Amino acid sequence: MIELVWIGSAYLMGLIASRLLFPPLVGYLIAGYALHASGFTTFTAIPHIADIGIELLLFTVGLKIKPRSLIRSEVLSVGGWHLLIVTAVSALMFFWLGKQITGGLVLGVSLAFSSTVLAIKVLEDNGELSSFHGRDVLSILILQDMIAIALLAFTDDHQPTPWALELLLIPFLRPVAYRLLEASRNAELRLLLGVTMALAGGVFAEHLDISADIGALLTGIMLGGHSKTEDIAHKLWGLKELFLVAFFLQIGLNNLPTQQQALTALALLAWLPLQGGLFFFLFIVAGLRARTAFVSSLALTTYSEFALITTESVVNSSLLGPEWQPIISLAVAGSLAIAAPLNRYSHILFAWLEPVLTRFERKKRQPHLDRIPESLGAAEWLVVGMGRTGVSAYAALHAQEKRVVGLDADPTVVEIHLAQNRRVIYGDSEDTELWSGLPLDKVKGVILTLPQFSLRCSAVTQLRQRGFRGKIGTIGYYDDEQEELMRLGADFVIHPLIEAGNQMARQMLKIKNPDA
């Protein structure tokens, strides 16, 4: 009965939120507070289910991580300076207010962390997890998680054992994991293997007194790189979404703040724009363009779910009063509810604010991947999106000795193609500045193989609006997609599966019948 109540409440409030153009997770947060106000309290299964959801989320993220492209100079500088500045400010504030300094300092550090769950979920929903800014955000989140482990050890007086170094053995298990994956030819078995490995990584990490989330992430990274990992991530998508509902519900189920506590939580929420502004400033100083800095900062402008754990620890250690638990709970929930819709429309928001934000860009920037290509050389054909379809189009043009260049938003994909002597440059198709600044004078045609329909529509629209008169070819999976793309200015639209059938028929007809 109780399961029906919390699942049904989550669905109802999620449906209302989606109808009001908010992400469903905003409804889940409200459902948690509504259930608490109705007399329901959290039960043992909810936190456990929430933990599983987070582990599955981080496991699927690990499947997509390419470690060599994860750590960047701006990550250490932006993440490190932001943490130091926020910690210093919080310490001064608690000293000025006459609060308990140690507990306030720990709380201030934890409030400098951003929500890993929300940021990754938003980036994944937007298809930006592999983009330049997506990797920077993910790297900063991992850096924060590493510091969070040490902070939690300090507040709990429970430090990781030296055996924690055994986590470094996980990458050496890759051959065994790959063999299991090859043996799991059934779709259900691959799904079970993914869940098993995510939970096994979490259990192993907990055994070493390390956060289970870190273990799940490392296990995903270990399994990543196999051709079938994308299939596992796809199958885990709906499952982890269901488990994550419990995470958002439990925030509201845990505590219901008083009026004074709610006002304090609102005061903490008022500080969020300053944290976001600090992130933006540090990204600009690191040499990033205004668009990248803005989108990255928006993804990081939340309070972390880790603050809930830290607050409980400092309260139990008598470093802060118990009234801080409902305050931080509401502040975290409020930050997630505010940030979720803003991140969904982050590119639209930047388009509105672009004239103001671009003024902060550094005039003389060092050569950086995050820049608009100044030249395409002698290229006459541009392929946007270097996945399987894009690579095939690139190879076909190159085979006919056409001058072609590829463009992709994943820095690692760019590096791989460059190593294979293909001419590929970095560029994010969602960047309006890219289409207005890309030198297309010599380009005769653009091929768009972007997976998201909205991105293809946006690219076609912006190309035609800037006056590009060359050919535009793209893909479409439904009749209405083809009609819309043609209306926007595409010269032709093909369905990949239909084209595959046509090619198969042509090849079959070319084969001579041995009995003829």
Image: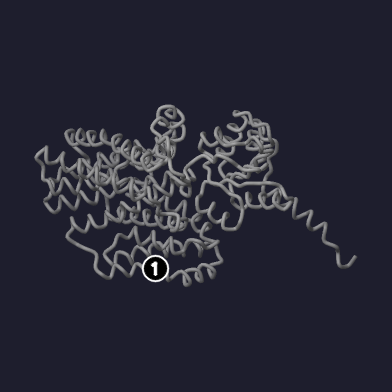
Q: In this view, does 141 lie above or below 33?
A: below
Q: In this view, does 116 lie above or below 342?
A: below
Give the quarter of the image for residue 147: bottom left
Characterize the local packing of mark 1: few (<14), some (14-19) or many (20 or more) Cα atoms within 10 angstroms. Answer: some
Q: Which quadrant would the C terminus be assigned to in this image? A: bottom right
Which residue, given by chain and number where applicable, does mark 1 sit on?
170
**Residue shown at 19%/49% (left/top)?**
106
Report whether residue 1 is seen: no
Report whether residue 496 is seen: yes
Q: Is residue 169 above or below residue 18?
A: below
Q: Where is residue 58 in the image (x, y as percent from the top left)?
A: 39, 55
Q: Where is residue 222 in the image (x, y as percent from the top left)?
A: 44, 64
Q: Position of residue 285 (x, y in %)?
A: 36, 40
Give the quarter of the image for residue 464: top right
Q: Position of residue 273 (x, y in %)?
A: 30, 34
Of all residues, the one furthest to the right in this rendering is 516
Picture mark count: 1
Q: In this view, does 270 lie above or below 399?
A: above
Of all residues, the one furthest to the left in this rendering is 98
Q: Which residue occupies the foreground of this view, 31 or 120?
A: 120
**Residue shown at 34%/58% (left/top)?**
213
**Residue shown at 32%/49% (left/top)?**
2
Q: Is residue 210 left or right of residue 412?
A: left
Identified by mark 1, the residue type is Ile
Q: In this view, does 393 lie to the left or right of 88?
A: right
Disc 1 on helix, strand or loop? helix
**Residue shown at 60%/29% (left/top)?**
466
